[in-house]
Image (cartoon, coloured by chain):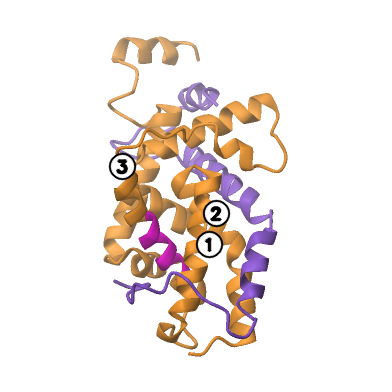
Chain colours: A orange, B purple
Amino acid sequence: MPLTNQLRDDILASVPSLRAFAISLSGNGDRADDLVQETLLRAIANIDSFQPGSNLPAWLFTILRNLFRSDYRKRRREVEDSEGNYAKTLKTQPSQGAHLEFEEFRAALDKLPQDQREALILVGASGFSYEDAAAICGCAVGTIKSRVNRARSKLSALLYVEGAEDFGPDNTVRAVIGGNG
Amino acid sequence: MKEVKSQASQTGAPRKQGGLNAEIQARIGHQLRAMYDDVVRQGVPDRFADLIRKLDEPGAQVGGDTEKNSGRD
């Protein structure tokens, strides 16, 4: 459809969540904003392929996600400073304790396989349905569900140890902990 | 954050094979949304508002149109 003023406004209204998605994926504020800019330019250049009445945010997220993945392949060999960079994008600096917890979370998120990370963000933070997330990632709904579950399980293991057999305390330690009660 | 582990142990939370503690999952969900929403609340930076506005101008050049498959491929 043609680029109407309404559509332009709707695209602009999607920018905050596109940025959040880009930063969550890349962990780097500057790179994320470049991704968002490229997404907007692509979207407007290809606006004819947008189906009126379909989900505009999902369409924009699809473009951004595909750009990120092609960009990621190009940059795979670069050593990136993902930790710490994100904090600079925050408007207000969290307190030291909260900051530490945040950095731990960010670091754990970055350890997830890309497929799992993007599925978790789309469903758990962006609020897309499993169906929309599957369309954005170009895979089956069941695949998205499984990726989200594995992502949660791995984050749980990385952050809280509990529930992860690989990281869990051995029986002796467990008995000691249990014996405190 | 590590205290969740000991709390879970003291309250005898079920340790299912590969199962996930509900409290931990709630915390992960909360942290994920906090990280995300912090960026959403920053609104639209000027550079993007300017970019869209410039595209309003007659004869505006739109870049990034070299690839036809913008979205669902």
Q: Is residue A144 magenta?
A: no
Q: State left or right for residue B20 relative to residue A87.
A: left
Q: Is residue A67 magenta?
A: yes
| Percent coordinates x, y for residue A46 in the rendering | 43, 79
Three-letter amino acid code at disc 1? Gln
What is the crowding at mark 3: few (fewer than 14 residues within 10 Å), some, or many (at least 20)?
few
Q: Are marks 2 and 1 in contact (CB under 8 Å)?
A: yes
Q: Give the main secondary structure, helix, strand or loop, of the magenta stretch.
A: helix
Closest to the observer, B73 or B49: B49
The answer to whether dots 2 and 1 both sit on one chain is yes
Residue drawn at (55%, 45%), measured in percent from left and top?
A: A29
| Percent coordinates x, y for residue A88 in the rendering | 62, 37
The magenta stretch spans which residues? A60-68
Q: State left or right for residue B64 relative to residue B40.
A: left
Residue that label 1 marks: A37
Kind of element beneath mark 2: helix
Residue drawn at (49%, 36%), measured in percent from left and top?
A: A106
Residue that label 3 marks: A76
The answer to whether dots 1 and 3 both sit on one chain is yes
> Is there any visible trace of residue B44 in the rendered image?
no
Residue drawn at (60%, 36%), measured in percent from left and top?
A: A87
Q: Chain of mark 1?
A: A
Q: Chain of mark 3?
A: A
Say which mark, if any, is on residue A33: 2
